[in-house]
Image (spheres, helix red, strand yellow):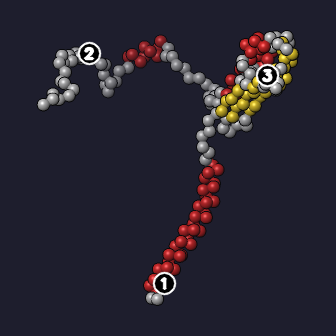
Amino acid sequence: MSAQPLRQSRLVLAVAAAALLAGCGAMDAGRRVTTALTPYRIEIVQGNFVSKEQVEALQKGMSRDQVRQILGTPLVTSVFHGERWDYVFTLKRQGVDPQQRRLTVFFQGESMDRVEGDPMPSESEFVAALDNRRKTGKVPRLEATEEELRSFDGKRTPAAPAATAQPATAAPANYPPLESPAR
């Protein structure tokens, strides 16, 4: 066996070993990159939001229809627990711990007996928790005063001369055909 193919095979093995070792280092760097970058995850809202005001409107002895009009259709009704309605609300957002609230309404026959569940936020508290836009603090003024309007009218620059009315050219009365005539 000549020395030339032996050297080439050693060179190929050395290059392969170097590539393998470089790949191991890239794995560590890749792991750092993937932990720094996270994919976008949509907000998941499931169930019935029940506010503190809705819970306060419930009264013992209300009919099932009255409770349904105040709280909406329950998320969970069971054949085995016909005297109980469960309202569950779940909110999952990126970068925030998932929120879950439960409210259970118990009935005796056709009238409401009691309500058990988590403390519910008011509607304004819930909306404030959902609003994730940045608060800038200062709202810019969107109207010009009369003085500003008058001063602007007087300032015309040569680069932007006043528009002069140009007579519009009349559209042709006859348009060319869209397709060529058949031969």
Dot 1 or dot 3, earlier in sequence: 1
> In the image, what residue type sits under mark 2?
Ala
Q: Which mark is residue 165?
A: 2
Report the residue that reaches farthest toward the front: 79
Alpha carbon separation for disc pair 1 and 3: 80 Å
Dot 3 or dot 2, earlier in sequence: 3
Q: Is residue 53 at least partly visible in the picture?
A: no
Residue sitting at 62 percent across and 30 percent down? 133
Front tag of 2 and 1: 1
Report the residue that reaches farthest toward the left: 183
Q: Is residue 153 above or below residue 28?
A: above
Does residue 31 appear left or right of residue 98 in this picture? left
Displayed quadrant of residue 132: top right
Query: In x, y percent, where is residue 72?
Result: 72, 18
Q: Is residue 76 at least partly visible in the picture?
A: yes
Q: Residues within 10 Å of mark 3 (few under 14, many from 20)?
A: many
Residue sitting at 76 percent across and 24 percent down? 77
Residue sitting at 75 percent across and 26 percent down? 76
Query: In x, y percent, where is residue 139?
Result: 59, 23
> In the image, what residue type sits under mark 3?
Trp
Alpha carbon separation for disc pair 2 and 1: 87 Å
Residue sitting at 43 percent across and 13 percent down? 150
Q: Which mark is residue 160?
A: none
| Residue wearing tag 3 | 85
> In the image, what residue type sits under mark 1?
Leu
Dot 2 or dot 1, earlier in sequence: 1
Does residue 100 appear left or right of residue 116 in this picture? left
| Residue wearing tag 1 | 6
Alpha carbon separation for disc pair 3 and 2: 72 Å
Displayed quadrant of residue 156: top left
